[in-house]
Amino acid sequence: MSKLIEVKDLTKQYENGEVVTKILHGLTFDIEKGEFVSIMGPSGSGKSTLMHILGFLDTLTSGTFLFEGRDVSQLSDDELADMRSNKIGFVFQAFNLLNRSTTLENVMLPLLYTKVSKKERVKRATELLIQVGLGHRLDYSPSKLSGGEKQRVAIARALVNDPEVIFADEPTGNLDSKSGLQVMKILQDLNRDKGHSIILVTHEKYTAEHAERIITLKDGLIESDKPVEKRQIADENGTLIK
């Protein structure tokens, strides 16, 4: 596998007048293309800040961050916007769906300002909703969906641009255990069958163990970085099979 992300001595701090708040303290790690990696840690560990930097939503303070060999700090605003649109898909704990739009319209949304034709937008979104088991919910509004169904819509939306990597930020945080396992099953399938790199951010160890590798943060430092010994695997019904 080739390297997707290379991070060396990455730091992040925020300044408010004379007050400096240091969040990340010299992180170094690589992520290969096609990997499923969890970034785990308690609240305040820096995991969300790190995800925002890796997803081009925030900038580092010092160190280096290469994405597919390109130094992200050297990219223009237009290049960063293009990378966000074409290389990255986001799945959030709060779903972030538009309640006045149908599930199909929500999934098509990232394609709205592209050159993709309406016919192709509908085709892609429909196929993805079928893939996540919601082909019978195309015309539903999010208010008529369960939490697990909303998260599946969010996953379909994240996939519509065929991104290189999917960032999933606490994707099971608002779900019951069965729905959460169904969502993790979808992410594992996308990684195994479609080759998408997955970066999962969570504070829960049993959720993190659905990945192949866990990077654990504590107080802005990497506490450990190791493979998962007993990986959690669920079926489509939300039942753990190992």
Image: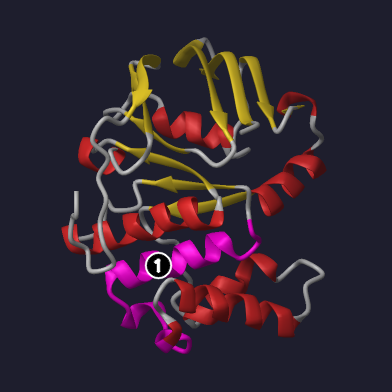
The quadrant holding residue 146 is: bottom left
- Residue 211's place in the image compared with 223, above or below, is below
Relative to 181, 50 lies left or right = right
- Residue 5's place in the image compared with 8, above or below, is below
Q: At 45% across and 84% down in the image, what residue appears? A: 135
Verify whether residue 138 appears in magenta.
yes
Q: What stretch is highlighted in magenta?
A: 136-162
Verify whether residue 229 appears in magenta.
no
Q: Main secondary structure of the magenta part?
A: helix
The quadrant holding residue 116 is: bottom right
Q: At 47% across and 30% down in the image, what residue appears? A: 49
Q: Residue 97 appears at what percent x and percent y?
A: 46, 68
- Residue 170 shows in the view: yes
- Residue 45's place in the image compared with 87, above or below, is above
Q: Which residue is label 1 attached to?
A: 152
- Residue 21's place in the image compared with 89, above or below, is above
Q: Residue 218 appears at what percent x and percent y?
A: 32, 18
Q: Residue 103 appears at what percent x and percent y?
A: 48, 79
- The local secondary structure at tag 1 comes to helix
